[in-house]
Image (cartoon, grey):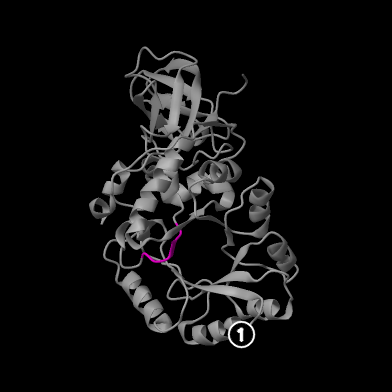
């Protein structure tokens, strides 16, 4: 079997979470553009898109390489390039593979105007309504829309923006962004797209023709504070390994690099075969929970490249080979992220070298959940 570190992906849970997002979006009869960039946040873009292919409205990726991977795998739904294209030569692939593209800058607009296409493309025209990254300024947006609308190679224009603070309750900045977007698009025709995961859950006034959930699909709350969405979604990923060594050290002995943790009493130490080279956060602090046979054991000592250590003193029956869960259905990745002073997105995207196993892909029925979440 080899090294016991394993990622298990529950595709039934993925479908469950997609339908939660769909229930919320159906309040406005919106489409769901499932975000599967960064290899579906390390869940496997091809596997996840295939599992959702019969129910998803479309998929969103960061770049053309990610889009072509899905097309080669047989995904036929609309695929959106969230950063658009980086060079005009990519327009040939956008044309050939019938991809949607974001336009967020004048250089992209000019390249599209100069590049003949065999098939008209759907463009998602991005406004920088307050995120401060990419997108046309509100005062430039109408001119960009008019230029796009005049191009014979453009079949539809989706009006788009992105929230900076949707995960913060009652954010004034989010309301300002929404007002800015609505003010500058009020009389422009076309579908609209604003909502990321957090906005899908908490901003019914922003749900529109297309919503773009990402983290929510993978069963992770997009909020830094407890929220009832956590009771309704299911974690898709479990990261696990096993105990490979157990020893009892005397009081005064230290564990790990830098000797940053010292035993105050005789302590039973278990070593788990996983470390920061696998994506477990090196800066997880002492006391970060690890589930050993379903029971919490505190992390002690600094996380190493390939191993970490836990205090098994209160778990005398644990043996070598017993299972260790680093995050999953019974241990929230959000809790681990908080103990490491980071966010779940980073933990997911940092996973490396751990073999991935998939299970399930079944349909589940849901009651209407919209009002319960608002």
Res 164 quadrant in image:
bottom left
Q: In this view of the protein, can residue 276 be seen by the observer?
A: yes
Query: Of residues 333 and 205, which is closer to you in this image?
Result: 205
Q: Is residue 28 magenta?
A: no
Looking at the figure, which quarter contains the C terminus? bottom left
Rendering coords of residue 304 (x, y %): 54, 34
172 w.r.t. 279: above or below: below
Q: Which residues are magenta?
A: 207-212
Looking at the figure, which quarter contains the N terminus? top right
Res 177 quadrant in image:
bottom left
Horizontal relation, residue 101 to residue 226: left or right: right
> Of helix, strand and loop, which mostly describes the magenta segment?
loop
Res 114 quadrant in image:
bottom right
* Label 1 neighbour load within 10 Å: few <14, some 14-19, many 20+: few
User: Given the current orientation, which residue lies at the most extreme left position?
Assistant: 372
Horizontal relation, residue 7 to residue 152: left or right: left
Q: In this view of the protein, can residue 302 be seen by the observer?
A: no
Total numbered labels: 1
55 w.r.t. 212: above or below: above
Horizontal relation, residue 11 to residue 354: left or right: left
For image coordinates 42% across by 47% down, the residue present is 18
Query: Of residues 98 and 195, which is closer to you in this image?
Result: 98
**Under tag 1, what secondary structure?**
loop
> Mark 1 sits on what residue?
150
Rendering coords of residue 305 (x, y %): 57, 35
Q: Is residue 208 magenta?
A: yes
For image coordinates 30% across by 48% down, the residue present is 229
For image coordinates 41% across by 31% down, the residue present is 299
67 w.r.t. 288: above or below: below
Rendering coords of residue 288 (x, y %): 38, 36
Rendering coords of residue 212 (x, y %): 46, 59
100 w.r.t. 363: above or below: below
């Amino acid at each position: 079997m080899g090294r016991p570190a394993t990622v298990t992906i529950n595709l039934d849970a993925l479908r469950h979470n997609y339908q939660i997002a769909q229930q919320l979006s159906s309040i406005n009869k919106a489409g769901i553009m499932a975000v599967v960039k960064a290899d579906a946040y390390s869940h496997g873009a091809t596997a996840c898109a295939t599992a959702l292919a019969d129910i998803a409205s479309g998929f969103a990726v960061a770049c053309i390489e990610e889009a072509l991977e899905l097309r080669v795998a047989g995904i036929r739904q609309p695929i959106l390039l969230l950063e658009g294209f980086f060079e005009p030569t990519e327009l040939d692939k956008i044309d050939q593979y019938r991809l949607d593209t974001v336009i967020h800058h004048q250089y992209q607009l000019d390249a599209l105007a100069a590049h003949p296409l065999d098939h008209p493309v759907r463009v998602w025209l991005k406004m920088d309504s307050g995120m401060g990254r990419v997108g046309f300024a509100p005062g430039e947006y109408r001119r960009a829309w008019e230029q796009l609308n005049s191009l014979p190679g453009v079949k539809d224009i989706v009006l788009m923006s992105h929230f900076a603070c949707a995960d913060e309750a009652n954010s004034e900045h989010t309301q300002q962004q929404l007002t800015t977007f609505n003010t500058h698009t009020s009389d422009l025709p076309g579908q609209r797209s604003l909502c990321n995961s957090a906005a899908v859950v908490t901003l019914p006034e922003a749900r529109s023709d297309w919503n773009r959930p990402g983290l929510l699909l993978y069963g992770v709350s997009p909020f830094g504070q407890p929220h009832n969405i956590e009771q309704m979604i299911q974690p898709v990923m479990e990261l696990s390994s096993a105990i490979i060594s157990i020893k009892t050290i005397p009081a005064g002995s230290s564990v790990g690099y830098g000797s940053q943790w010292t035993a105050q009493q005789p302590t039973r130490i278990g070593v788990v075969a996983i470390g920061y080279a696998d994506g477990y956060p090196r800066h997880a602090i002492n006391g970060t929970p690890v589930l050993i046979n379903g029971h919490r054991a505190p992390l002690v000592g600094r996380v190493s490249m390939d191993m970490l250590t836990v205090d098994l003193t209160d778990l005398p029956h644990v043996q070598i080979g017993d299972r260790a869960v680093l995050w999953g259905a019974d241990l929230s990745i959000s809790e681990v992220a908080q103990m490491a002073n980071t966010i779940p997105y980073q933990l997911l995207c940092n996973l490396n070298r751990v073999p991935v196993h998939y299970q399930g892909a079944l349909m589940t029925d849901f009651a209407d959940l919209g009002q319960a979440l608002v």
